[in-house]
Amino acid sequence: MSDVGPLLPAGRTVTLIFDAHLDLAWNALGWSRDLTQSLEAINARESTWGDHPARGRATTCLPEMRRGEVAVCLGVILARTRPESPVAEGILRLSPDYPSPAMTYAAGRAHLAYYQWLARQSHVVLIGSAAQLRQHWQRWQKAPSPRPAPGVILAMEGADPIVRPDQAAEWWKAGLRVVSLVHYGQGPYAAGTGHRGPLTPAGIELLGQFQRLGIILDLTHLAEPGCSQALDCFDGPVMASHNNCRALVPGDRQFSDRQLRKLIARDAVIGIAADAWMLHANWQRGRTPRSAVSIAAMADHIDHVCQLSGTARHVGLGSDLDGGYGR
């Protein structure tokens, strides 16, 4: 799948979008949003719900993707094993956390089943190879209105639903093509955002499975020691689906210039995220207004990657829209 080559015919300019990170299944199954409906219908349905401040603020749905000319996205499977996560008053199903590996696996399979159902109903097109990607992209170019169904490449944010390294083949057979090892904190395979540490022995073994199968490694959320280790021991294709620049916004959720240069040297693409707190150097949760951030901040991160690489080849979009926060 990594050898995609140029998607656009010579001399042809289009406005189609490839979004490298959309939590579609989590929005549907965790947030109880019917993504085949319009944004107006989704937000009207939940406007009186009080379980989260982002209720009534959805930004992403399949009709909106067509309208915005999002031809392809990485459709994310997200579930984490966190035995310690429930608090005294219980846990909302908005959370991607589960107390056992078996439950995390089942939740991941539910996300997979949701994408498969969307494909069976012709709401999306599942893409599993470079040839299918080229064909789908060309179909969008030739059909300006109405747009075809968006394409979805199956991705996993945090590899927790892969309960054992030798289970990676099962997920590959089901259509999974891109995987990051960890999300936040310490996972079974690596340390993630907010934690510091190397890959675990199981993580190193899992990378061997990825390389054998041809799964693309997403380095997003991986702690810096583990990121360097992964690049040293994994020779397959790598990317960062939704990651910004630490030189502009401090914090370990962003990549340092050293990390970005290593990715560029591996011919990787870095998808710039739209999360407001990743775009504002002094963002304070619950205090900084959203109006403090504009799309110009995303452009600054895009430009920073371009300046490091000397080309636009290594930067794209990984919006993370509706990644748990709404508009």
Image: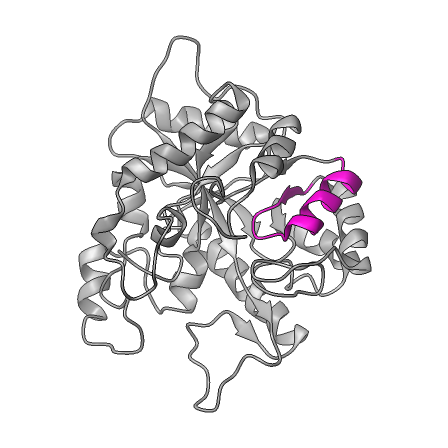
Q: Is residue 313 above or below residue 30?
A: above
Q: Is residue 319 above or below residue 198?
A: above
Q: Is residue 76 above or below residue 74?
A: below
Rendered location of residue 217, percent (x, y): 65, 43
Q: Nearer the viewer, residue 174 or 23?
A: 23
Q: Quadrant of residue 37?
A: bottom left
Rendered location of residue 114, percent (x, y): 47, 60
Outermost residue to the bottom: 88
Work out which quarter of the rendered image holds the C terminus and state it: bottom left
Q: Residue at x 53, y 61 (%)?
A: 78
Q: How is the image coloured?
A: one colour
| Residue 176 seen in the figure | no
Q: Which residues are magenta?
A: 215-235
Q: Is residue 57 left or right of residue 112?
A: left
Q: Residue at x 44, y 13 (%)?
A: 9
Q: Quadrant of residue 148?
A: top left
The answer to if 291 sits in the magenta stretch is no
Outermost residue to the top: 11
Q: Nearer the viewer, residue 290 or 206?
A: 290
